[in-house]
Image (cartoon, coloured by chain):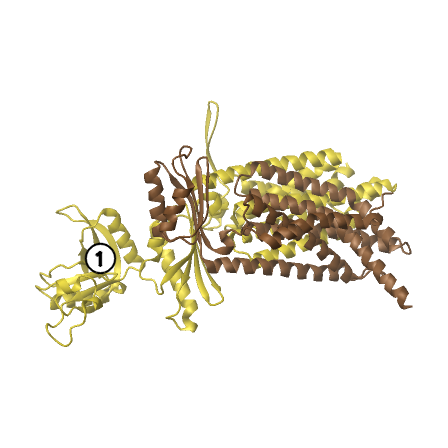
Amino acid sequence: MKKSPRRLFWLIIALTLMAGFINLPSIKTISIGPIHKNINFNPNTILTKFRINKEFMFRRGLDLEGGTSITFRADMSGIASTQRNDALNGVKTVIERRINLFGVSEPIIQTSSVIGDSRIIVELPGVTDVNQAISLIGTTAQLSFWEEGATGSAKIASSSAYPLGAVQVLGENPQKSSLTGKDLQQASVSFDQNTGKPQVQLVFSSDGSKKFAEITKRNVNKVVAIVLDDIVIEAPRVNEPILTGNAVISGSFVLDQAKTLSTQLNAGALPVPLSVLEQRVIGPTLGLESLKKSLFAGIIGFVIIILFMCVLYGRLGVLASIALFIYSLIVLAIFKISNITPYGITLTLSGIAGFILSIGMAVDANILIFERIKEERRLGKREEVSVELGFTRAWSSIRDSNVSTLITSAILYQFGTGVVRGFALVLAIGVLVSMFSAIVVTRTFLRVVSKN
Amino acid sequence: MINIIGKKYWYFVISLIVVIPGLIAFILYGLNLSIDFTGGSRITVSFPQKVEKITSEKIKNTLINQNLKVSTVEISGKSLLVRTSPMDQKQNIKFVSMLSKEFKGAKETQFETIGPTIGAETTANAIKAVIFASILIILYITWSFRSVPKPASSLRFGVCAIVALIHDVLVVVGIFAILGHFFKVEVDSLFVTALLTVIGFSVHDTIVVFDRIRENLKRMMGAPFSQIVNESILQTLDRSLNTSLTVILVLFALLLFGGETIRWFIVALLVGVISGTYSSIFNASPLLVLWHELAEKRKKTKS
């Protein structure tokens, strides 16, 4: 390493260019004055070449993007302890499906188990109507079909044992059929050809079609009730057996209701009941404002550091500033790249604070080295010797102090939730890259400069 | 040469003057804990114009009518901040629709509800995190300074670093206890983050001085311990001040331009960084000398 500062120098330049390239935003058209040029420039084209179906991007947290975060508690009391993990993952899948149908981009759905408590954390960027979100995620849409039972037979149960309205349309003894929402293949919204009203179209699976055919055969000229979540929503009279496996719930919906119902039916029922433990809604304007302010503060902070270093250490300070610039490029590129791995880093307000703070710590490493170089010079050593000594002698304190920061960030990550974790992760990445920038980048620059 | 070690008791007194009032405030009033720790709801509503029609009394009453406990109602210019016991969806909708009826264009910009279980968990985790971090750092320093020559012992370095760290934690917590009582400043989970960052920074600073002591112990064999420590402090003084100054300048930039949300987070960091710089120079290393002197004295009286 010591023998070829030049090779290392070019390596650093290459790394910087790569990081810079990844950080570039995607541009479609450029227009400078009268010149209008169509340029299709996008760092993501590399990914498409490698057939990676993801994007280099900064994933912004809810505090910067605006949105809703909800923590649910899953009630596992009805489920054997050996099956709880599966049940929790089942809940997660159902929620994922429901949210996808809801059309939220970039949702984050996580499960966590805290001693005796199973939780699902859902983050929905851009969604600010928490009530709508909770009712969509949390409601179980359970579809069932009821038919008339034998009249006057056996005991008459109280009407509360049946779905609301069932006794009125089906008589004293309604019977639940074996056909349920599980037999559905697909639900969709369509419009009644005569009235133009929205309705929900049901297509049953082959098994469900058979069951439905039997029910309709049994009940020609009788009423069959369609029950959703224990309420009769429709009770049509069967005119003839339906063998095709298609049915329609016409009800009296407005369009949104029909959409929500079909969404819920498609997503299926939740295996366990959920209750809301925590919810946060951040308005989109507040998020944007925070983002602008923290970016501005970051730039100001960066400029202050550069000025400070240049004034204090002159030529050395300029080199350190370039190293800092490279440091920032690399860290930002890591944020972007992390998004194509399973360990995507979400940038939050505290994360940005952590990043700016880590710039401060990166500067510290440089200051330690430069002060040491100054000292060695004062002792009368030659410049080249003092530079080398400065680096080797400052190393132990840089190592020890940074390791202690890494310990703190590891513990923050372990014990923290959401906000705290983001901060810890960014700080740790910052510290690691800052060691690289202070030791390798600055040193190589110094060696190359002093050789010329 | 400036003699810092000679005046060590003065520096300890200065530390006490800062720490004791905060500690008293902490014992008397505690911290003004946010719903992150206690559980509850926080609602921010913004209005298109300055609010005059709605009084905080009225808002309080409507909330109390819904069986909610109200802890604060703050009206400042165009925005309203309300903190209550956990509020559910229906109560929230009712409240917001009441406001928009009363005042056109009222908009809920933030609505958070944190259940009491989560609050208790956050508190427990925060305390655990601070304790675990301290223990691991003592262990790391003790291990990293294991080859330190006599008369010093590596465990002493670790313990003194932690004493300086506790000093900084007490300063920050104390000042926030005072701010919380007199200026209603809240402590949230970001505060814990700030505290842990201060811990990291404090140890970071202390280690730089200790590292120099370790080096000088080998180089200045035979010199009195207090002189070695004094010289090490002076040699690292430029670095300590320059680094702290950069960090403080950056924090000031964040404080001025970073916006409302992270303001108190930054204040906590600023206080902690200043305290951390002070304690690494004027507490940790002088303490090392004090310990050494006490140990020497005991040795003499024994023999």
Instruction: Locate residue A60, reporting x and y percent.
Output: 49, 46
Instruction: List the single residue furthest toward the bottom.
Output: A154
x and y percent of residue A89 in the render?
A: 41, 63
**Taking A57 as reference, is A245 left or right?**
left
Secondary structure state at the residue bearing disc 1: strand
Res A296 quadrant in image: top right
Image check: A95 left or right of A57?
left
Q: Nearer the viewer, residue A427 or A452?
A: A427
Q: In the picture, residue A156 is in which quadrant?
A: bottom left
Q: Which chain is in brown here? A: B
Callout 1 environment at 10 Å: few (<14), some (14 to 19), or many (20+)?
many
Image quadrant in which the C terminus of chain A is located: top right
Q: Nearer the viewer, residue B76 or B278?
A: B76
The answer to whether one can see residue A2 in this image is no
Q: Position of residue A108 (x, y in %)?
A: 44, 53
Q: Does residue A71 sit above or below A326 in this rendering? A: below
Which residue does the image show at 21% across and 54% down from the upper left?
A: A201
Q: Please tell me which residue is depicted at 33% across the width and 43% down the height of the picture.
A: B97
Label count reads: 1
Q: Give the residue furthest to the top.
A: A34
Side (left or right) of A1 relative to A242: right
- Which chain's residue wears label 1? A
Q: Which residue is mark 1?
A: A202
Q: Residue at x 47, y 55 (%)?
A: B39
Left or right? Give the position of A247 relative to A44: left
Camera-side residue of A75 and B64: B64
Amino acid under label 1?
A: Leu
Q: Position of residue A409 (x, y in %)?
A: 61, 54
Note the chain letter of the yellow one: A
